[in-house]
């Protein structure tokens, strides 16, 4: 089954171009829509192979945007019974720029992250640039909330990490596919490859896709306070 956000997102951008009467932004929006569709399909493959799903603010265009600082109707994460959690135990994660994605298995000893083959997609290898990424990130807060697309986990970074995230995504947003993508790595495993269309300046992003109320709250607990 396709990602429920894949085609609506793609069609919405194309519809915006048609409604705008083919203004100067038209070709850019069409290209953005097609890039978003390709990345959505890749994320779909990651989900099928058992990886998690990470969703950043991937759209920021004239008239069509997912705002970096959008107001969310969030529900605080639920601590484990009998305790309030400990921020020092929160699971850390990394955001690493993607340099290439090839439909082949990763060579032994390479720095690539493998994506297992599925019934409909071949194996692939995601190469990253660890020197230019962010490592050992710990979220200041993690909140599960329900949006129109389903359950998500909203993460907020520290002021220092927010600055690093803004710098990283500012550079990525200007690059061509796949160099405008970032690999999300948790506990040494690839969780998702996320397309960055605009700088994330407020240290806010969300993990989404296939989450239930229970799994969203558990993930918020894991990344926000740990157990």
Image: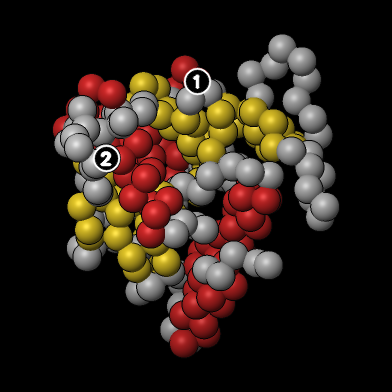
Q: Residues within 10 Å of mark 1 (few under 14, many from 20)?
A: some
Measure the C-alpha gap from mark 1 to mark 2. 34 Å
Q: Residue at x 52, y 82 (%)?
A: 15
Relative placement, left or right, of 72 versus 62 is left
Q: Which quarter of the rendering shows the C terminus?
A: top left
Residue drawn where x is 46% and y is 47% of the image: 54
- What scheme was used to colour the molecule? secondary structure
Q: What residue is pinned by disc 1?
A: 130
54 over 9 or under it: above or below = above
The circle drawn on residue 166 is none
What residue lies at 30% left-to-right and 40% top-to-bottom?
221
Compared to residue 21, the image places residue 86 above or below, namely above
Q: Position of 22 compared to 82: left or right?
A: right
Where is residue 200 shown, x and y percent of the image?
31, 46
Q: Which residue does the image show at 20% across and 28% down from the upper left?
A: 86
> For residue 208, what is the image quadrant?
bottom left
Q: Residues within 10 Å of mark 2 (few under 14, many from 20)?
A: few
Mark closest to the chain's N terminus, 1 or 2: 2
110 or 35, which is in the foreground? 110
Label 2 sits on a secondary structure element that is: loop
Q: Which residue is mark 2?
A: 80
Tell me where residue 41 appears, x and y as whole percent: 65, 57
State the SS at label 1: helix
**Residue 165 can be seen in this image:** no
Q: Is residue 141 visible?
A: yes
Most extreme residue toward the top is 109
Evaluate if marks 1 and 2 touch, with contact meaning CB atoms under 8 Å apart. Answer: no
Is residue 56 placed above or below 189 in the rendered structure? below
As rendered, which of 149 and 133 lies closer to the eye?
Answer: 149
> Can you give x and y, in whole percent of width and height, for residue 118 in the image?
78, 48
């Amino acid at each position: 089954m396709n990602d429920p956000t894949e085609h609506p997102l793609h069609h919405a951008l194309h519809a915006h171009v048609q409604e705008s009467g083919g203004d100067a932004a038209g070709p850019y929006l069409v290209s953005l829509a097609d890039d978003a569709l390709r990345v959505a399909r890749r994320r779909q493959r990651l989900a099928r192979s058992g990886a998690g799903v990470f969703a950043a603010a991937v759209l920021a265009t004239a008239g069509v945007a997912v705002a970096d600082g959008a107001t969310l109707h969030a529900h605080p994460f639920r601590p484990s019974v009998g305790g309030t959690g400990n921020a020092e135990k929160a699971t850390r994660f990394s955001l690493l720029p993607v340099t290439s994605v090839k439909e082949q298995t990763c060579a032994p000893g390479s720095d690539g992250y493998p994506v297992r083959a599925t019934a409909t997609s071949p194996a692939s290898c995601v190469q990253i640039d660890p020197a230019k990424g962010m490592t050992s990130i710990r979220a200041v807060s993690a909140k599960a909330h329900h949006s129109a697309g389903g359950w998500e986990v909203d993460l907020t970074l520290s002021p220092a990490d927010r600055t690093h995230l803004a710098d990283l995504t500012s550079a990525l947003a200007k690059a061509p596919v796949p160099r405008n993508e970032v690999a999300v790595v948790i506990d040494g495993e690839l969780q998702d490859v996320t397309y960055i269309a605009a700088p994330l300046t407020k240290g806010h992003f969300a993990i989404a896709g296939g989450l239930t109320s229970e799994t969203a709250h558990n993930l918020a607990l894991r990344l926000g306070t740990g157990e």
